[in-house]
Amino acid sequence: MPLFTSSVANSTDLQNISLQSKNIRIYPSPELEKIWKKWRAACRYCFNQAIAMQRQSTTRISKLKLRNLVMQSDLPQWVKETPCHIRQNAIFDAHQAISASCDAKFRSIRDPRQTIKFNNSNFTKGTWYSQLTKTLKFKASEPIPEQWDYGTQLTYRRGKWFAVFPEPVIKSHTSSRKIIALDPGVRTFLTGYDGDRVIEIGNGDMGRIVRLCQHEYDLISRSTKVNAKRRRSMRKAANRIREKIRNLIDEVHKKAAHYLTNNYGLIFLPRFESSHMVAKSRRKIRSKTVRSMLTWGACAVLGFPQVEQLASHYHFKLILKHQAAKRGCVVLDVGESHTSKTCGVCGHRHTKLGGAKIHKCPPCGSQTPRDANGARNIMLRALRDSFFTVSNDGIAIVTVRALEINVQECSA
């Protein structure tokens, strides 16, 4: 698993500053971990108390009033021993959840991801609440700063602790003016065409991921037929496999996004809607392809029910757009209908192409790799349907439809 990751920070106190999160794996001593787990439980308790009080009230309670109600209630002694700012931030999280949805849920001890939020003043001398934990130490995968200017977090995810440090986003503009069209798929995760060459990303990697999924599914199936001790060890093994699958897919997505945004200024990416393509009522692909798409995709609900929220083509799109914003690139969503079926030489639409790896055109006899043909046609279609200009500051995109609307408004 990568020891360092970067993602958009969940910051509420500095909304005018663009931040990203630096996640560092940490290894606390048993005594320190016991304290952190107590703080984590207190966060969950205060959060749930705030949700319960809001549900009992007929009117919306303000953030500060909700904090006072929970803090002044009859809390257990072990919760009162938890530092005030930790409990306060948990209550503020509950208020934010209520504001986002009137049906805000309680937090469970079984949640795979649990977070303790701190104010910036709580992190000093390279640790959290140094006066309370000054004799207790932890190790980290990389150097930990002595202090931090922003609010930090401790995240407990599937038995592992991570320190989260928000930091300003450093933007760097790519000097490349090149354009590439991407064709997402199953056998090859991404096939790209930039006018000079065809590139393939993740070619054949799906086989290894599917084998890991099958092994995990087999462990979960057999765990129902053994005693409790054996079942526990088998489920732990399944969790390790699931983490490996998630990390493999995440690695492909991040490396692909980094390469593309460093080498291209404009990226055409089709709308890849896995959920619509795999719906039983309308799909034209076999179940094995469905499993593969959903493993690259959002959730393997068919065949591998325990694979939760693996990085999808949609998730890759989010990562790509996030990296593109940092490097001054443009990612343009385009259509891909019939791009694999259409011959790149004569324009004939091959209605019986099916799942063939090679596009063999019946009228002209040309033979082209299916994914390469699709990527090239996506490029041609995007260039036909879009008008764009390249300037020193970047690439400004105006679609043909936008131009038509503008002309109509001017005429009116």
Image (spheres, grey):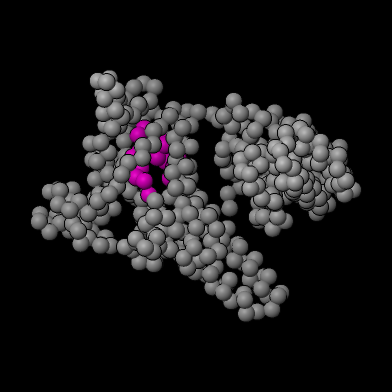
Viewer-proximal residue, 140 or 150? Answer: 150
**Which image quadrant is residue 50 in?**
top right
Residue 107 picture location, percent across and down:
70, 51
Residue shown at 29% from the left, 23% from the top? 409
261 drawn magenta: yes
Relative to residue 166, is residue 293 depicted above or below? below
Q: Is residue 368 left or right of residue 245?
A: left
Viewer-proximal residue, 362 or 258? Answer: 362
Region rendered in magenta? 256-272
Most distant residue in the right direction:
77
**Which image quadrant is residue 364 in?**
bottom left
Viewer-proximal residue, 392 or 175? Answer: 392
Residue shown at 41% from the left, 37% from the top? 261
Q: Is residue 350 visible?
A: yes
Residue shown at 47% from the left, 37% from the top? 323
Residue 223 picture location, percent across and down:
62, 74
Residue 182 picture location, percent across and down:
33, 45
Q: Is residue 411 left or right of residue 285?
A: left
Q: Is residue 207 left or right of residue 405?
A: right
131 drawn magenta: no
